[in-house]
Image (cartoon, rainbow, N blue to C red):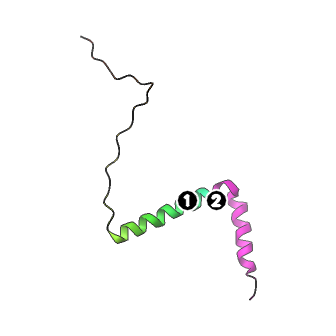
């Protein structure tokens, strides 16, 4: 079996263009996109309503002054 030299060249070019830190982020985004596509094609995933923003413990609830 012949060693695929073109894959090595592609890998080096990708490392030069994106750098080592950006590649995991790109792969994570690609995986989420593929997962979302598969869920959309299966039609079993129901859209979830967005969660309300959580209040931090440092914020005090607004009080009405009369």
Task: In this rendered view, identify the residue nearer to me: 17 or 44.
Answer: 44
Q: Image check: 21 left or right of 41?
A: right
Residue 52 locus on image (x, y percent): 34, 40
Q: Please rate how many residues cluster around mark 1, counting C-alpha atoms within 10 Å: few if below 14, some from 14 to 19, many from 20.
A: few
Task: In this rendered view, identify the residue nearer to me: 11 or 2.
Answer: 2
Q: Which residue has dot 2 on it? A: 23
Q: Secondary structure at mark 2?
A: helix
Q: Image check: 40 left or right of 5?
A: left
| Residue at far bottom of view | 1
- The residue under the point 71% across, 62% down is 15
Residue 25 locus on image (x, y percent): 59, 56
Label ID, residue 28:
1
Mark 2 touching mark 1, by CB under 8 A? no
- The residue under the point 69% across, 65% down is 14
Where is the N terminus found, in terms of image quarters? bottom right
Give the vertical position of 42 relative to 32 (above or below): below
- Is 52 colored magenta in this rendering? no
Identify the image quadrant of residue 23.
Answer: bottom right
User: How far apart, in angstroms, are the residues tagged by discs 2 and 1?
Assistant: 9 Å
Q: Which residues are magenta?
A: 1-22
Q: Main secondary structure of the magenta part?
A: helix
Q: Secondary structure at mark 1?
A: helix
| Residue at far top of view | 66
Give the vertical position of 57 relative to 8 (above or below): above
Q: Image check: 51 left or right of 35?
A: left
- The residue under the point 67% across, 58% down is 18
| Residue at far left of view | 66
Identify the image quadrant of residue 43.
Answer: bottom left
- The residue under the point 43% across, 30% down is 56
Q: Earlier in the sequence, mark 2 or mark 1?
A: 2
């Amino acid at each position: 079996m012949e060693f695929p030299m073109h894959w090595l060249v592609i890998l080096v070019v990708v490392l030069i263009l994106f750098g080592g830190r950006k590649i995991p982020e790109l792969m994570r985004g690609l995986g989420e996109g593929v997962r979302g596509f598969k869920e959309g094609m299966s039609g079993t995933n129901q859209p979830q309503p967005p969660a309300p923003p959580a209040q931090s413990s440092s914020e005090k609830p607004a009080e009405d002054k009369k």
